[in-house]
Amino acid sequence: MSRGKMVDLLELLMSDKPNLPNKFTIALGELVRKARTDANISQKDLAWNAHINQAAISLIETGKRSVSAEELVYLSNALNKPIPYFFSMGMLHPIDENSLSILEQELVQNARQLNETDLKKIIAQIKAINNL
């Protein structure tokens, strides 16, 4: 991110006036809605499980309300999704696949062939190895 964009982002975050919806809140809301519908639960059920009222869930899903760090943890738990799930690739710094080593490329290629459950198991194993 360029210095100018970083300054713009900081000014926006420190501003007293809400600037919603914005690209971030819209993308986050879409991810929350997708996770909720994939889990086949209603907004009411998500609200109960995430300790957030239903009106707030509706506003979050439409990008008209931001989400605090605490609420993100609750949503992550209620939807059984890791916190990074809620950040679309456009919000994260994508990795240039050409910069990966041959072993990293092989890992990515094989990971793409796994179903979500197996991929989660592999990620948990990698995290365990990294914590040794």
Image (cartoon, rainbow, N blue to C red):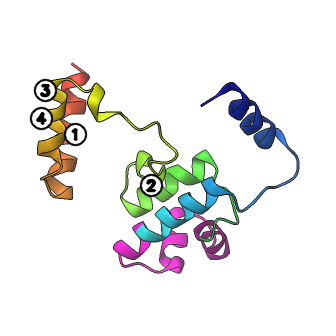
For the magenta stretch, what is the residue range? 35-61
Gap in angstroms between the C-alphas marked 1 and 2: 16 Å
User: Crowdedness of circle 2 by 10 Å Cα count: few (<14), some, many (20+)?
Assistant: some
Residue 97's quadrant in the figure? top left
User: Is the residue under label 3 in contact with that under label 4 (CB below 8 Å)?
Assistant: yes
93 left or right of 9 in image: left
Q: Disc 2 designates what residue?
A: 76
In the rendered structure, which disc, 4 or 1, sits on the residue that comes first in sequence?
Answer: 4
Q: Position of residue 127 (x, y in %)?
A: 25, 31
Rendered image: mark on residue 106: 4
Q: Residue at x 48, y 49 (%)?
A: 87
Q: Secondary structure at mark 2?
A: helix
Q: Amino acid at mark 3?
A: Leu
Q: Residue at x 22, y 40 (%)?
A: 123
Q: Disc 3 designates what residue?
A: 103
Gap in angstroms between the C-alphas marked 2 and 4: 30 Å
Q: Disc 1 designates what residue?
A: 124
